[in-house]
């Protein structure tokens, strides 16, 4: 077989790459997929915010938040660990089938445990009295994890299929929204639809997976997966504690309206975060393979990805902060205007999460250093809970936003400090200079555009985004920014072919 040491690495990689999609195509498909994942919740939020108002939105956000702890714990770390295991199996069908079967069974057992735990807690704890039906509906997403095999398709780099499937399911769900959510009493129907959006993806996944894997129950070995998965589960638990505790504590300490403000503010910020991170979030399978076989390419990919993320996140953070007072009431209505300030507070997450998702999270997992994340998550969770308890009573949704930004920054600094010896980031001053100069010009340009007398907030926001985006690209091209130059060279190569 070509995986034997006697065959040169270059030849083995050529054979594997015949079955792999290019990173560029993967990134494009993944950006579309991530856009669907954030635009669909945003569009549904725009519609339901006007129907359910701040209290109804807050009720559903709080119930989904409680269920989300169990949704993310139920896979027992398989969603990240599975991508790596499938990727390093290469095109060895027997190994892939065995690893898939082992991980599917582990996922089945853990999902059963967490589903039972969720419904028991919801039915027995007094603080949930009166909202049981909404919480039961939101819990269906935990049950749907039985057939969640997205990790298989990500490990195989099947981002084209993932994107197409997601598009059709979300269109169907969006149409259901207009039929089933008509009055402010229809908040439970809204919760049902979000479950359908998830469940549809998982059903398609199970039907389609026969093309790639089949169950193989001979000689299964579960123990070698348990250690890494328990570490990842601990990381997920702690990560959830610091990333979701904001909404949980807002619900307890304030009320439905404040929860609604924070929820919608986070959705807007999350759109930018996901789109900026999407260009590199497809790197995990390739990084896992490179780490095993080619350390030089591993480091090149980390550096290249970090550069792309900075190129996108720096102007995105500045731009969103400047137009937040336009875009929030324009999308959600005047009732949600307080969320505009929350958006401004949350914008540093765009850079922090963007760089951290690659330089910390993906590097740690692909190199087998999941344990090094644990300390960071423990400290981050404790910091976030403490800051929330201190700031939410006084600053409500903005206090939760400050806590979230501080915890995320602290976590990424700790992880990076632990793995810094593994990676040597080399970002040129020329690249940073051109990126910052073009962002400063964009800042002053937006200041002028915001003074224009345009009454429609969304039209004015769209004009700001279009003009600022064009300026940013043109100025960077004139300053010969690395990312623009590489993009032009790539297009030239494709045109010549």
Image (cartoon, grey):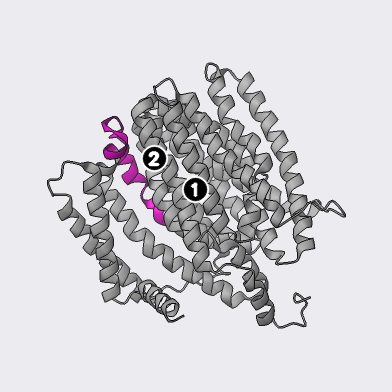
Q: Which residue is mark 2?
A: 43
Asked if residue 265 can be seen in this view, the reply is yes
Q: Is residue 373 above or below residue 386?
A: below
**For the point 22% across and 53% down, which residue is it?**
463
Mark closer to the chain start, 2 or 1 = 2
Horizontal side of residue 458 vs 154, given as left or right: left
Image quarter where the N terminus lies is bottom right
State which region is magenta.
Answer: 329-353
State the residue position of label 1: 167
On screen, residue 277 above or below 189: below
Where residue 485 sits: x, y (%)? 37, 76
Q: Determine the residue positioned at 67% across, 47% down.
A: 207
Q: In whole angstroms, how far apart are the C-alphas of marks 2 and 1?
A: 14 Å
Dot 2, crowdedness within 10 Å: few (<14), some or many (≥20)? some
Image x and y of residue 20, in percent: 61, 68
In the displayed structure, 218 sits above or below 423; it is above
Count neighbours of disc 1 (C-alpha within 10 A) and say few if under 14, some if 14 to 19, many if 20 or more.
some
User: Secondary structure under badge 2?
Assistant: helix
Q: Position of residue 247 (x, y in %)?
A: 46, 34
Element at badge 1? helix
């Amino acid at each position: 077989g070509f995986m034997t040491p006697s065959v040169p690495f270059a030849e083995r990689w050529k054979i594997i790459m015949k079955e792999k999609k290019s990173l560029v195509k993967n990134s494009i498909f993944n950006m579309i997929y991530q856009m669907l994942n954030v635009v669909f919740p945003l569009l549904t939020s725009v519609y339901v915010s006007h129907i359910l108002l701040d209290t109804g939105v807050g009720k559903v956000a709080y119930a989904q938040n409680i269920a989300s702890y169990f949704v993310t714990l139920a896979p027992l770390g398989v969603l990240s660990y599975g991508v790596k295991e499938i990727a390093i199996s290469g095109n060895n069908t027997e190994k892939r089938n065995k690893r898939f079967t082992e991980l599917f069974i582990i996922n089945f057992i853990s999902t059963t445990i967490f589903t039972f735990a969720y419904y028991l807690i919801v039915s027995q704890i007094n603080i949930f009295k009166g909202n049981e039906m909404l919480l039961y509906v939101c819990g269906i997403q935990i049950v749907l994890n039985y057939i969640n095999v997205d990790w298989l398709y990500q490990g195989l780099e099947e981002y084209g299929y993932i994107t197409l499937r997601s598009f059709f399911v979300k269109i169907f769900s969006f149409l259901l929204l207009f039929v089933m959510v008509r009055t402010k009493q229809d908040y439970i129907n809204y919760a049902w639809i979000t479950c359908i959006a998830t469940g549809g993806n998982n059903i398609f996944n199970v039907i389609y997976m026969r093309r790639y894997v089949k169950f193989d129950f001979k000689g299964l070995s579960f123990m070698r997966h348990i250690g890494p998965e328990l570490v990842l589960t601990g990381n997920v638990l702690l990560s959830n504690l610091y990333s979701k505790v904001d909404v949980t504590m807002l619900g307890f300490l304030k009320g439905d309206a404040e929860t609604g403000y924070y929820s919608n503010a986070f959705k807007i910020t999350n759109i930018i975060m996901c789109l900026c991170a999407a260009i590199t979030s497809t790197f995990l399978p390739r990084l896992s393979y490179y780490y095993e076989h080619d350390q030089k390419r591993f480091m090149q990919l980390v550096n290249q990805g970090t550069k792309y993320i900075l190129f996108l996140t720096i102007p995105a953070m500045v731009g969103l902060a400047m137009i937040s007072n336009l875009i929030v009431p324009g999308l959600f209505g005047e009732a949600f205007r307080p969320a505009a300030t929350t958006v401004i507070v949350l914008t540093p997450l765009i850079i922090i999460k963007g760089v951290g998702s690659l330089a910390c999270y993906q590097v740690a997992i692909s190199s087998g250093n999941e344990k090094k994340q644990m300390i960071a998550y423990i400290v981050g969770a404790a910091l976030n809970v403490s800051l929330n308890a201190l700031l939410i009573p006084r600053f409500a949704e903005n206090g939760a936003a400050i806590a979230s930004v501080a915890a995320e920054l602290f976590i990424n600094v700790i992880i990076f400090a632990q793995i810094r010896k593994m990676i040597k980031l080399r970002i040129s001053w020329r690249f940073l200079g051109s990126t910052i100069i073009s962002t400063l010009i964009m800042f002053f340009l937006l200041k002028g555009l915001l003074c224009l007398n345009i009454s429609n907030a969304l039209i004015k926001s769209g004009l700001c985004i279009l003009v600022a985006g064009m300026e940013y690209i043109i100025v960077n091209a004139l300053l010969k920014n690395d990312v623009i130059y590489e993009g032009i060279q790539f297009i030239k190569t494709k045109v010549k072919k």
